[in-house]
């Protein structure tokens, strides 16, 4: 449960509220395209950006709407290949790291695959290190010149946090990512979850062919998205069996402004109903203690 710290001992209260309040279905609007060159997916990327709204500053403050994004290119060489990239780098307390997003390996995903043990950014040409993780003939960038990839495994979670309070989980209304070298998409897809680990949508990334580019994004009418699980291929870029035909890397991440979810107002009639249950709950606890 993504927001388990928010529920805790309030579970009975939440259950009553969920029974009393009307439910809703959060349908996803999917944005997807693939091709060899950046121009082949540019329109779909732009459409997704427009759907989420204007680009917000990368500062530790809150905005009511809009989007944030990562193109990896401003990161220093010190946290790029061959060094590890910290999964919480873009959940920092100051600009330009204040973007409200973190990455974490997932070893328990039911969809299969190995959980990532870490992350890496590809090196720049000026660094003297091999670019594109050494697969420069197979991988390409959408926005030069860095790429992002999980290491030690290919399954990881994208989590959202309040940009102004980096310890508080947040919700957003959409997430999208650019992929490169999607030759077989059986193991390249994204699953979108709400705050209670309910699956909102699951979509496979379009195949781009060797060295091509793909984009996949999902947007929602409300801020309901708490986690995205990404399966980025069968072999990680640092795997012993990795080669140009079976590795997948990523470029731009685009996501709606992470919003700290406010408590849902309780109608007066529902408050009176819940109040009527309070004495019953107290007597039930008393009986349990006596037993």
Image (cartoon, helix red, strand yellow):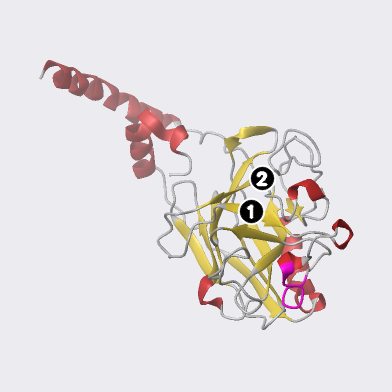
Can residue 224 be seen from the camera position used here? Answer: no
- In the rendered structure, find residue 119 and report the number of the disc placed on it: 1
Q: Magenta region: which residues?
A: 134-140
Q: Position of residue 226 (x, y in %)?
A: 55, 48
Label 1 neighbour load within 10 Å: few <14, some 14-19, many 20+ = many
Residue 163, magenta (yes or no): no
Instruction: Name the one closer to the observer, 198 or 210.
Output: 210
Q: Which residue is mark 2?
A: 86
Question: From the viewer's perspective, is 217 left or right of 11?
Answer: right
**Residue at the image point whose x is 43% and y is 65% from the top:** 112
**Residue at the image point whose x is 21% and y is 21% from the top:** 285
Instruction: Name the one closer to the observer, 51 or 73.
Output: 73
**Residue 259 lies in what quarter of the image?**
top right
Question: From the viewer's perspective, is 60 left or right of 266?
Answer: right
**Disc 2 and disc 1 in contact, CB within 8 angstroms:** yes
Rounded to the nearest angstrom, the CA distance separating label 2 from label 1 is 7 Å
Q: Position of residue 196 (x, y in %)?
A: 44, 47
Instruction: Name the one closer to the observer, 63 or 250.
Output: 250
């Amino acid at each position: 449960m993504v927001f388990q710290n928010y529920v805790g001992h309030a579970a009975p209260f939440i259950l009553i509220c969920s029974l009393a309040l009307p439910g809703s279905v959060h349908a996803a609007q999917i944005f997807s395209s693939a091709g060899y060159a950046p121009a082949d997916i540019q329109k779909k990327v732009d459409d997704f950006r427009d759907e989420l709204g204007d680009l917000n500053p990368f500062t530790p403050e809150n905005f009511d709407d809009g989007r944030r994004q990562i193109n990896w290119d401003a990161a220093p060489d010190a946290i790029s290949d061959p060094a590890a990239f910290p999964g919480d780098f873009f959940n920092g307390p100051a600009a330009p790291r204040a973007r409200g997003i973190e990455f974490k390996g997932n070893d328990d995903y039911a969809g299969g695959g190995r959980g990532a043990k870490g992350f890496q950014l590809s090196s720049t040409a000026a660094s003297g290190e091999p670019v594109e993780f050494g697969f420069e003939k197979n991988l390409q960038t959408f926005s030069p010149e860095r790429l992002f990839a999980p290491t030690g495994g290919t399954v990881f979670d994208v989590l959202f946090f309040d940009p102004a309070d980096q310890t508080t989980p947040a919700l957003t209304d959409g997430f999208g990512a650019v992929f490169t070298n999607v030759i077989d998409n059986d193991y390249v897809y994204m699953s979108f979850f709400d705050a209670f680990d309910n699956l909102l949508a699951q979509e496979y990334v379009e195949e781009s062919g060797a060295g091509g580019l793909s984009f996949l994004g999902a947007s929602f009418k409300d801020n309901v998205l708490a986690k995205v699980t990404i399966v980025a291929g069968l072999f990680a870029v640092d795997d012993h069996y990795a080669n140009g035909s079976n590795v997948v890397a990523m470029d731009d991440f685009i996501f709606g402004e992470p919003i700290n979810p406010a408590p849902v107002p309780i109608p007066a009639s529902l408050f009176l109903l819940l109040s009527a249950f309070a004495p019953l709950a107290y007597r039930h606890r008393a009986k349990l203690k006596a037993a």
